[in-house]
Amino acid sequence: MIAANLQAVRSTLSDGVKLIAVSKTHPNEAIMEAYQAGHRVFGENKVQEMTDKYNDLPKDIEWHLIGHLQTNKVKYIAPFVSLIHAVDSLKLLMEINKQAAKNNRVIDCLLQLHVAQEETKFGMDGEEVIQLLNSHEYKDMQHIRIVGVMAMATNTSNEDQIRIEFRSVKQIFHDLKRDFFATSDHFREISTGMSSDYLIAKEEGSTMIRVGSSIFGSRG
Ligand SMILES: *Cc1c(COP(=O)(O)O)cnc(C)c1O
């Protein structure tokens, strides 16, 4: 079932788009089913849950932290996390840099953009991102690498609304690339799209989709 679902989602994607299988709340057995089917990239939104799964499961899995990250929890994932999707403040980025240094690592990060209409969603607007990237604290960081942006669209059935939001993410991405990362080939990821909207995200330039329920079933 999980293998077939994975295959179904994959078949809709072109080569340049990476599929993050969002396994939050699902047991190790479900992850191993996807693993046996050849999948290696999983997303979790809670630090404790991701750390437990990391300890129990094969070490060639790439773990992505996709949810809001509290500064005081960075230390638990710094030894192994492969990509942190939701960096939404300079303070958080400074802590990631510090913990990455302790682990002799450079941790890849995405800047979370706020484009949805809901007030509850985390993320920065374009101005806040520019401030962060212009700060001397950021310029001194040796142990993080910003590889792109991440966003969530409004939870709505209005596809035009979702498309407009993803399009604005793509626009901000291109502006940042031009103004801050013109000489870097690392800044190339747009993490947009979940089960309900990844087909739209893909059409609007997504390079990473984060899909949970369409692969593992509903979270009850
Ligand atoms: C849970 C979650 C997803 C996946 O959601 P589905 O609707 O199950 O595909 C994607 N991104 C984030 C940030 C999430 O928390």
Image (cartoon, rainbow, N blue to C red):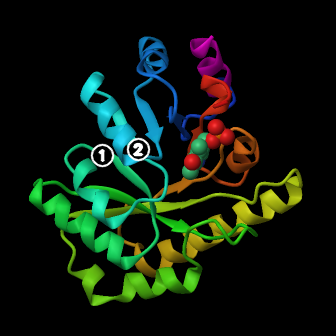
Q: Which residue is mark 1?
A: 81
The residue depicted at 47 percent of the width and 84 percent of the height is: 130
Circles 2, 1 touching at the beta carbon (< 8 Å): yes
| Quarter of image, res 19 | top right
Seen from the viewer's position, the closer of residues 35 and 134 is 35
Callout 2: SS: strand
Say what amino acid the circle numbered 2 marks. His
In the image, is residue 139 above or below residue 44?
A: below
- Image coordinates for residue 193, horizontal then vertical, percent: 65, 47
The x and y percentages for residue 101 are: 13, 62
Rendered location of residue 132, percent (x, y): 40, 83
| Quadrant where ligand 1 appears | top right
Percent coordinates x, y for residue 139 in the rendering = 26, 81
Element on which disc 1 rests: loop
Q: Quadrant of the N terminus?
A: top right
Q: Which residue is mark 2?
A: 64
Amino acid identity at mark 1: Val
Q: Mark 2 or mark 1, which has the lower sequence index?
A: 2
What segment carries the magenta color? 1-10
